[in-house]
Each structure stands twice: as C-alpha cells, then as structure tokens.
Amino acid sequence: MTVKAQLAERALGVETFLSGCLRDRSVPERLLSAMEYSLLAGGKRLRPVLTLSWAGMLGPGDADFADAIMPFAAALECIHTYSLIHDDLPAMDDDDLRRGRPSNHKQFDEATAILAGDGLLTEAFGLMSVASMAGGLPANHVLRAISVMAAAAGAGGMVGGQAVDMEFTGRTGVPLEELKEMHAMKTGALITAACECGAILAGAGETDVENAREFGRAVGVAFQIVDDVLDVVGDTATLGKPAGSDEAMGKATYPSLVGLDRSKELAAGYVGTALERLAPYTGGDREFLSGLARYIVDRVN
Amino acid sequence: MTVKAQLAERALGVETFLSGCLRDRSVPERLLSAMEYSLLAGGKRLRPVLTLSWAGMLGPGDADFADAIMPFAAALECIHTYSLIHDDLPAMDDDDLRRGRPSNHKQFDEATAILAGDGLLTEAFGLMSVASMAGGLPANHVLRAISVMAAAAGAGGMVGGQAVDMEFTGRTGVPLEELKEMHAMKTGALITAACECGAILAGAGETDVENAREFGRAVGVAFQIVDDVLDVVGDTATLGKPAGSDEAMGKATYPSLVGLDRSKELAAGYVGTALERLAPYTGGDREFLSGLARYIVDRVN
C-alpha cells in the first residue's frame, strides 16, 4: 500500500469522528453548516493522523486506546480548519478558493466565517478535555497536552505566525532566518504539537516526547518549504487553490529567497532529520511515519 | 464598603495577574500590543470575580487556593475580551468605540483584531490548563471545568448566541422567548460557567455546583436586561459606548419588546431567583455575591 493510501486509511477514522462531533450541541443551524462546510471539506487530516500514529507507536496500541485518543486528535483538525477560515478572510489573505471550493466567507458571509472559526477553535478544547473524561486517559496527561496545544496554536505559535506573515506581505528582503521563524510559528508549531501530544497522551517518557517534538518540527519545516515550492511549480487544478498566489501577494517564500533547487535540497535535509528521530522505534506506526516524512517532499498537493 | 468598591477590590488581583499573563510567551510585538490594549482596558472583571467568589465560598478559602484558581479565573476575562473584539468588527456589530476608546480594529487594523481575538481565546485555555499544573488543583476538576467553559463559550453557547444575534438584527417581531434564548447563549452562558467553574474547582458537591450554575444563569439574564435598559436610558459618556446603538441597529431588546418598566421588573425577579440560590451559605463571599446580584439591577454602566 502506498503512503498516500495509508494516510487516507488512517484519516478515515478521523473523518467519521469529525462528521458527528459537532452534532451533540445545540448549535444554530447556519453556524453549524458553516463549521461543517470547512471541517468536512476533506483535507489530508495530517495533524490528527500524526497524533494517532505517535500515540500508537508509543502507547499500548490497542483499539480502546486509539478510541480514547481520537477526540484529542480530531481537535487538531478543528484548530487547523479554523485557522484556514480566518486566514482566508478579506482582512487577511483574502482568498476566494480553498480546497477547490469557495472559501467559508464566500460561501456564507464574513460574520459567519469569523464565528465558525471561533466556534471550531473553542470546540477543539472541548474535545481535548473530553479525551480524558470519556476515554479514561489520565487527567494529568490530557492537561499537559492541552497546555502544549494552547501554546502551539496561540499568539506565541500559529496565531503569532500569521500575524508576522501579514507583516511580511509586500515587504521585500525578508531574511531567511525570519522566514524560518515565521513558518515555525505559523505551520510548524501545530504539526510539532500534534506529534508531541501523541507522545504525551501515550504516557511516554521525556526522551520519546522530545523525539516526537523534533520529528514534528523537522517535518513541519519540510512541509512548508514544499508548500512554497508547489505554489510555484503546481497548477491551480491540482492544488485546489490559485497557483502563484504567493508571488502575486508579494509573499516572501523559500523559492523567492533561495531559489527552487536549494529549496528542494533544504526540504530533503529536514526529512532526513525527521527520520533520525524515528530510529529508536519499530512496528507499523514507525514504518508509516517514516513513509509519511518521505512523502511530504514527494507530494504534488 | 459599597459593593462597587468590593468588586473593584476583588478585581485588583485579576488585574495584576492579567497584566503579566501574556508576557512569558514570545508573542510578536504588534499582536501583543493589540491583545493587551483590549485585555487591560479596565472592565469590571465580573466573570473572574464570580469564579473567585464562588470558589472562595465553597473551597478552603485560604490565599494559596485563591492563587491556584487565579489563572482559570483570568482565562474567563480573556474569553470575554476576545468576544468583544470580534463582536466589534465591521462584519459583525461594526462598533468604533469600546469602553470609551477606539475599538481594537480601529486602534490597530482588522487583521490584527481578528488575530488578537484568536490569540486571547487560545491563551484562555492555556491559562485554564496551567491552573492545575502550577497550582496543584486536582487535574480531573480542572478538566471538567475546561469542558464546561468550552461548551459555554463555543458554538452551542456564546459564539452561537452572537450568530443568532446577527440573524435577529433588522428582523422585526422577534418573540421574547427567542430573545431570551439568544441572550442565554450570548452573555448568560459565560457568566453561568464562571460561577459553575468556581464551584467545580473548589471540589464542591453536585448540589452546590447546581446552585452556582443557577445563580449564574439568573444573574446573567438580569445583567443582559439591565444592559438593554441602559442602552435606552444611559448616556454615551457614562456607558463608554454610544447610547441608543441597539435601536439604531434595529436590534430586538427587552425594552423594545416589553417596555422599560416591565424590563426592570423582570430584571428584579431574576435577581430574586439568584439570591435564593445563596440561601444555604454564609460568610464574606456570600455577602459579596448577594450584594453583587443586587448591584446588577442598580448599576448605571
């Protein structure tokens, strides 16, 4: 089975969980539609799968344990989705398309899109807290993981990265170090936390938690570089969003700073770093995670 | 000492905590300024004080315990503040003034205001998770309280209430029952959760948790009715926001549906319900909470 097929298979459980997770609260109809419109738009579910795979590799690995982790893993997709909705807003990146469909505020309206994002972000923490109460995970593990997630998703992480990215737009001569720091916050922090939280929820020791974190960090950088590269070499139909939009927006990117070839070399280097962190482990989850790391530099969208 | 002075005194500790709580993360400068601009704009800190007072009344009541509760209590103010920032946005209520100063997006810009709100909401859950790890509160109590907060602040609570409020704007003939339900979500849910979480964090039994919740629910409704009334009878300088803005926006309010006098009667009735829930308790926190409930109908801003 290809890594892409394995990723899709692992994403299936996440998909099923996500499709029901907003239904048990009395959410106003239009708001619920807007939240589900973006949440169920069929992304790769990379972040939840990373959490599940790291937890599976380091934890007991049975079905009950995977079920207990699921709400927390799904919460990562809620956070990722909310960030896409808010990033697409006219005041931010002003994107009309997302995953080949109208972005949330085009399909609904700006107010609804803002609130759908707010709702998904809040719901994410509700799902995380449920991971212990319903699934029997130790409460102190879940609390530590919530703390890691909040730091990664917040103003010192993902939200801060988007703020810096906005400041970069149209600015020429952004140094590579600043670009790296911005990406580490904007996309890296959440991917890193996805891996780290999987290890924490599995009750892993500090060495394993560090391996998870550093694997996530390296994979996150590689992922972003490839994203930048694809914006240059990809086409709109394959990407599901307008190709060349970074250049049109005047965004600093890896290709614009170091060129296409050097960007690809850098991405491959980070994947190597990620693979080193998997060396201590064995089994199916390890094989999947190493394949996934390699797939990131080979993907086309 | 008047209730207003007591409220101000209890808010002091919250104020001190809030003024430092965003500083230990590496938040980009402009974003941090925007978050603190609204967070430290000097509100009444009603929600954190409710949490602290209920926790104080039902818990051990010493200084260490109050310190342990503080991050969680302060988190409520982060959530309240984020909701004000997002509600003021042009796509939402489009308010230029808040607490007598330019609203966040007027002082900064729309993108920054959206991100400042996102950052404060995320930080809130970070603070909640810290309440156990740093302060030694039982992890399962904190997790339950986080779950209650997420439900209250999310799409089935505060965020959903704002969505319904947007739908009401400009619509004529909103029935009183629907208006009540909207307010219960938009402002009631967070005030209710503030009280309930105080009881939960104090390790209180279910009867006490229910008293806290129902006290909060009644106080929340009274608070909203008085807010509506003040928008009609208050003046811009005292309110710190434009008086008569509800009417100008075509919003359904208690005065517009049942008249001023009946609105005041209703508010007084809810305060009575709140006071009944305090009957089992004694001590300084009880006296303060009963004074606070009465103050809500007597306040001028």
Image (cartoon, coloured by chain):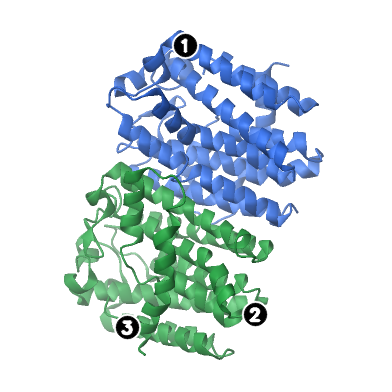
Chain colours: A blue, B green
The residue located at (63%, 29%) in the rendering is A215
- Front position among marks 3 and 1: 1
- Is disc 3 in contact with disc 2, using a CB cutoff of under 8 Å? no
Chain at tag 3: B
Q: Residues within 10 Å of mark 1 (few under 14, many from 20)?
A: few
**Mark 2: secondary structure:** helix
Q: Nearer the viewer, mark 1 or mark 2?
A: 1
Quarter that holds the N terminus of chain A: top right
User: Under tag 1, what secondary structure?
Assistant: helix
**Residue A104: x percent and y percent?**
41, 37
Q: Is residue B284 above or below residue A203?
A: below
Inter-mark Cα distance, 1 to 2:
65 Å
Closer to viewer: mark 3 or mark 2: 2
Q: Please name the residue that numbered disc 1 is placed on.
A: A262
Residue A254 relative to residue B51: left or right: left
Question: Looking at the picture, how far across and down is residue A269, in whole percent?
Answer: 57, 17
User: Which residue does the numbered mark 3 point to in the structure image?
Assistant: B264
Q: Residue shown at 80%/38% (left/top)? A: A61
| Quarter holding residue A83 | top left
Q: Foreground: B288 or A174? A: A174
Q: Are marks 3 and 2 on the same chain?
A: yes
Kindly identify which numbered label has been placed on residue B207: 2
Horizontal side of A148 relative to A106 (left or right) equals right
Give, as a three-letter code, the residue at label 3: Lys
Asked if badge 3 and badge 1 are on a common chain, one would say no
In the image, residue A286 lies at what x, y percent? 74, 26
Q: Residue at x 58, y 53 (%)?
A: A126
Q: Nearer the viewer, residue B99 or A77?
A: B99
